[in-house]
């Protein structure tokens, strides 16, 4: 599972697989699909809420039963920045409508608000916004702060993905309102499914991306 130990196309224990994941907007540099970075912002390790150093962390929650991809945005990390998930169509036929869902973890410990936007593409160049999957962490800060989870799902995303073509889902984090330090956030249970009678597993992202 994910332990905050970096990202690689040949992941070791504790790392994420870049065959289906790409990252952008970190001071340690971008990582494209198939790339690798096992230091700096990409290897902040396992944490509890309340960090200050920017980068990617692993956050156990639900009593340790789940682990989120956890972000601490700063002036040089994730403002804007984020990640892209790639899911390839191996069903044997074109798919024209998709359902996408994810869990968004919020730790609102600072007075700057943040926004998360989600977009889709079938070529990783031209992207279509999906406002139904957007969310925010709003001002003012919660006192005391605690992890809150929003479960977002939209099952009517119209985009054509031919057989052996891939769907790209881009999650972008950015400043929204206010100033000063930024709150923390996490992502888990990302699902990408065709809206058809075909089994979800045919297009669902790889186990090396999803973390229970």
Image (cartoon, rainbow, N blue to C red):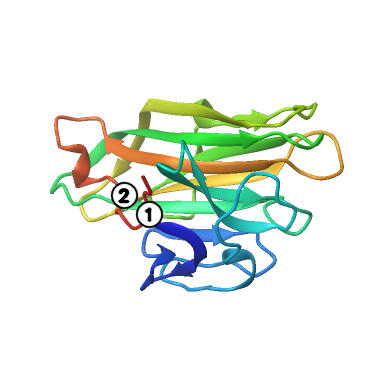
Q: Position of residue 180 (x, y in %)?
A: 86, 43
Q: What label does residue 205 carry, if any?
A: 2
Residue of label 1: 209
Q: CA distance from mark 2 to mark 1?
A: 7 Å
Name the foreground residue: 55 vs 191: 55
Q: Is residue 188 left or right of residue 171?
A: left
Q: Residues at badges 2 and 1 in contact (C-beta under 8 Å)? A: yes
Q: Is residue 113 above or below residue 91?
A: above
Disc number lying in front (2 or 1): 1
Which residue is rendered at x = 67% and y = 43% of the image?
184
Secondary structure of the residue carrying numbered label 2: loop
Q: Name the residue at the front extreme.
A: 63
Q: What label does residue 115 carry, if any?
A: none
Q: Is residue 161 above or below residue 4?
A: above
Secondary structure of the residue carrying numbered label 1: loop
Which residue is rendered at x = 34% and y = 58% of the image?
208
Quadrant of the rendered image containing residue 41: bottom right
Q: Position of residue 30 (x, y in %)?
A: 59, 66
Count numbered badges in the picture: 2
Name the foreground residue: 152 vs 33: 152
């Amino acid at each position: 599972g994910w332990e905050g130990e970096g990202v690689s196309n040949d992941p070791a224990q504790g790392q994420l697989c870049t065959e289906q994941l790409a990252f952008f907007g970190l001071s340690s540099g971008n990582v494209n699909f198939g790339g690798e970075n096992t230091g700096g912002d990409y290897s902040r390790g396992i944490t509890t809420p309340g960090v200050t150093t920017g980068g990617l962390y692993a956050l156990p929650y639900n009593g340790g039963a789940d682990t989120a991809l956890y972000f601490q945005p700063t002036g040089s990390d994730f403002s804007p920045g984020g990640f892209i998930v790639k899911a390839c169509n191996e069903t044997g036929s074109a798919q024209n409508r998709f359902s996408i869902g994810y869990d968004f973890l919020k730790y609102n410990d600072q007075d700057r608000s943040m926004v998360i936007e989600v977009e889709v593409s079938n070529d990783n160049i031209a992207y279509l916004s999906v406002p139904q999957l957007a969310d925010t962490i709003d001002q003012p800060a919660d006192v005391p702060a605690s992890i809150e989870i929003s479960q977002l799902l939209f099952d009517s995303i119209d985009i054509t993905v031919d057989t052996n073509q891939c769907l790209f889902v881009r999650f972008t984090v950015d400043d929204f309102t206010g100033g000063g330090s930024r709150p923390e956030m996490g992502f888990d249970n990302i699902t990408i499914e065709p809206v058809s009678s075909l089994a979800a597993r045919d297009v669902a992202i790889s186990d090396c991306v999803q973390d229970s």
